[in-house]
Amino acid sequence: MRLAVTVLAAVILMCVPALGEPAPARLGPGQEGKLEIKGYKYPCVIYVPIDYKDGTPMPAIFHMHGAGCDPTTAPFRQATAGKGYIVVGLSYATYPNGGKFGISIDPKTLQADVDAMVLFIDKVRKLVDETWGIDQEKVFLSGFSMGGRAVDCFGFTPEARGLYRGYCLISSGPMKVATVDFSVAWGLPVLMVNGENDPNLKTANAGRPLLDRAGAAVMQAVLPGEGHIISDAKLHPVLSKWLQGIAEQDSRAAAAAEESGEPIFRGLALKYCRAEAAALRDKTLPLEPTLATLDKLGVAGGDNAEEAAKLAANARAWAAKRKEALKAASASRPAATAQKTADFLPRVTNLPEEKELSGLLATLTADKSVRELMKIRADLDAVGKATADHGTKGKDDPALAPIVERLKAFLAAVGPGQALKAEAQEMMDGI
């Protein structure tokens, strides 16, 4: 069966003028132009945000246009006020006429069509990353109208698993075809936006349960008085709020991720070095043996060499960054830092960070008051864990009473203005 995409006259309002001459090889902040992909006839278009800084990877949005349109950075360039995101308007370069007048879903060629387009998007993404730099953990795939159908085919597919931070469907809706696997969106934010008079709203409403059951974090906005073409005044705030919410969520998770070692995996698809990645992720294992394995793989050649080298480099950079973070925190939170340093030291055994962190720990724990507050914190954490395990309320746990008395005595003994006093007071306030 062939799915024909009807071109509505109104869709032309969403289009942009035909692209002119090729843009310079490397656009600067605030510039937009053609993005030529070697081996493909139909170019994309790219916008570089005004706050772009050379050498600093940025989040990116890859947007697929509707039928009858050309590649465009709208509406995301405008919704982001031109800041914070590289925006790429994708062409359907693997389809006849660049897909300008529609793409088809033919069971006989569907898998081949999907494979070809996913490969094309990968090449676009690689070129953008090599030229400007992409934060690979913050890449979004979006589509308007027919472009939303394209998100189904090229985004919710096993070949794209793990490649995107989130998905956006504008004036479209989730639609199940043979190659679609909505579990790809498990745990990821998916925004669905339709006007209340949009003919595709029925598709969106029917398809949302598919995403819900697959575990996606779906946000659906139905805008009153709007049709298939949503006004900028209504659409842009929805897109902006959605992106801002994700950015805030990522920011809150960043501090915890730094401690857990998640930055080791940033920018890696982990197609080859999965066992080594699992070892690096395990907080109980030292990094050094796995780094030695990765170093051997990195010089051995083969498909996994590049990934192994990058994984090892990321792990070493993270260890060095954690060392500096612990040193910086030692003045304001000496007891907490001493404990974190003690926990982290086994991970950097035989690495350059070991000697310096051992010295830091020895310096911190030479202070009797630091050791005492560490004991109080450990006892408090043990009570908190027991409370959680037994489902009781922490403040009602009788085991807290002696800890509170110890904290009161500690606060009375430590002089004003000392970092330990502020740290102990923070613990008391949290009880």
Image: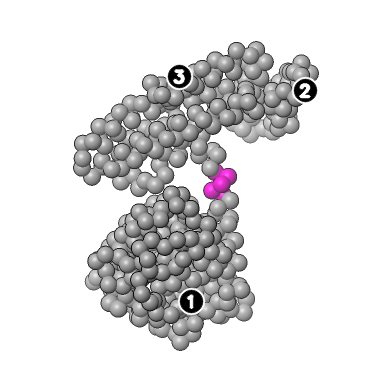
**Residue position marked by numbered label 1 in the rendering:** 200
Which of the 4 quarters of the picture holds residue 412? top right
Residue 256, given in percent of the width and then of the height, sits at 54, 38
Amino acid type of disc 2?
Pro
Whether residue 239 is visible: no
* Pointers 2 and 3 in contact (C-beta within 8 Å): no
Q: Residue 247 appears at what percent x and percent y?
A: 55, 53
Badge 3 density bin: few <14, some 14–19, many ≥20, Cα 10 Å: few
Few, some or many C-alpha atoms within 10 Å of disc 1 (few <14, some 14-19, many ≥20)? some
- Residue marked by disc 2: 416
Q: State which tag comes first along the sequence, 2 or 1.
A: 1
Q: Position of residue 317 (x, y in %)?
A: 42, 35
Look at the magenta stretch and give its main secondary structure.
Answer: helix
Residue linked to disc 3: 355
Q: Residue at point 30% right, 65% down?
A: 37
Mark 3 element type = helix
- Which quadrant holds the N terminus? bottom left
Q: CA distance from mark 2 to mark 1?
A: 65 Å
Residue contact between numbered discs 2 and 1, judged by CB atoms under 8 Å: no
State the extent of the magenta-drawn residues as a range. Answer: 249-253
Q: CA distance from mark 2 to mark 3?
A: 33 Å
Where in the figure is residue 430, as x and y percent of width and height? Answer: 71, 32
Q: Is residue 110 left or right of residue 6?
A: left
- Do labels 3 and 1 touch, CB within 8 Å? no
